[in-house]
Image (cartoon, rainbow, N blue to C red):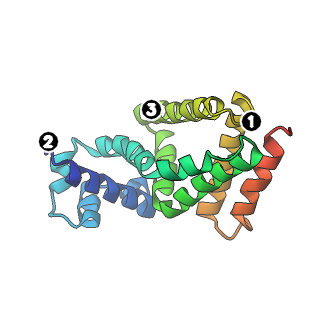
Amino acid sequence: MAQNPARRAALIDAAIEVLAGEGARGLTFRAVDVRAGVPAGTASNYFANRDDVLHQVAGRVHHHLTPDPEVIAGLLRAPRDRALVAALLQDLLRRIEAHRSGYLALLELRLEATRRPELRTELTRTLREQLDANIAYHLGEGLPGDRDTVVVLYLAMTGLLLEHLTLPELLDAPTALVDTLVARIIPAG
């Protein structure tokens, strides 16, 4: 397997775009090569098979969606209240809107995981780690609510993002909806 990390990352980014635009069935080495603008056969030099590409996409999407530490540091100067939780979720919404194809690729991976037990196992592990890290972060930063609060926020944001990114005309003002869901989920006080 070829080892150029920058080329590998570019190929995974191309795979994300293919997944988002064409779905899992459209994800072929040839489609990745074309999207990445590299010679035919390049992807097959970097990945053992299509499953290898699928397994690497989720990690790469999470890499793209990682918050900017300076933005988070600025937000965390605020009091630990509902408004801060809303601001953190607004930042998440902005990051996902900026990398829409990445989130759509994750949705495709979720669908593909219903048909591929090995992918389901790995994707479940990856998303479980993310959720556990979000819970630990929320509690560790002293944000309002408990573990269940974070899980309910996760579920609400997942639904909002699904609707907003797949049927953007369905919901009015997703930014305002983030504020509403925080006000309804985070305990008063």
Asked if the residue at tag 3 contacts the one at tag 1, i.e. Cβ–Cβ closer than 8 Å, the answer is no
Q: Is residue 81 left or right of residue 97?
A: right
For image coordinates 57% across by 60% down, the residue present is: 94
Q: Is residue 117 left or right of residue 90?
A: left
Report the residue marked by disc 3.
117
Report the residue marked by disc 1.
144
Sequence-first disc among 2 and 3: 2
Kindly identify the amino acid type of the residue bearing the numbered disc 2. Answer: Met
Of tags 1 and 2, the one toward the viewer is 1
Choose top left, top right, bottom left or bottom right for residue 1.
top left
Kindly identify the amino acid type of the residue bearing the numbered disc 1. Answer: Pro
Report the residue marked by disc 2.
1
Sequence-first disc among 1 and 2: 2
Kindly identify the amino acid type of the residue bearing the numbered disc 3. Answer: Pro
Farthest-out residue, front: 77
Task: Please tell me whether mark 3 sits on a helix, a strand or a loop.
Answer: helix
Front residue of 67/16: it is: 67
The percent position of residue 28, horizontal first and vertical second, equals 29, 55
- Viewport quadrant of the C terminus: top right
Task: Please tell me whether mark 1 sits on a helix, a strand or a loop.
Answer: loop
- Against 19, residue 167 (above or below) is below
Give the Cα distance between marks 2 and 3: 25 Å
Sequence-first disc among 1 and 3: 3
Task: Please tell me whether mark 2 sits on a helix, a strand or a loop.
Answer: loop
Give the Cα distance between marks 1 and 3: 37 Å
- Against 164, residue 184 (above or below) is above
Front residue of 84/181: it is: 84
Choose top left, top right, bottom left or bottom right for residue 169.
bottom right
The percent position of residue 123, horizontal first and vertical second, equals 46, 36
Front residue of 136/33: it is: 136
For image coordinates 70% across by 42% down, the residue present is: 153
For image coordinates 64% across by 65% down, the residue present is: 167
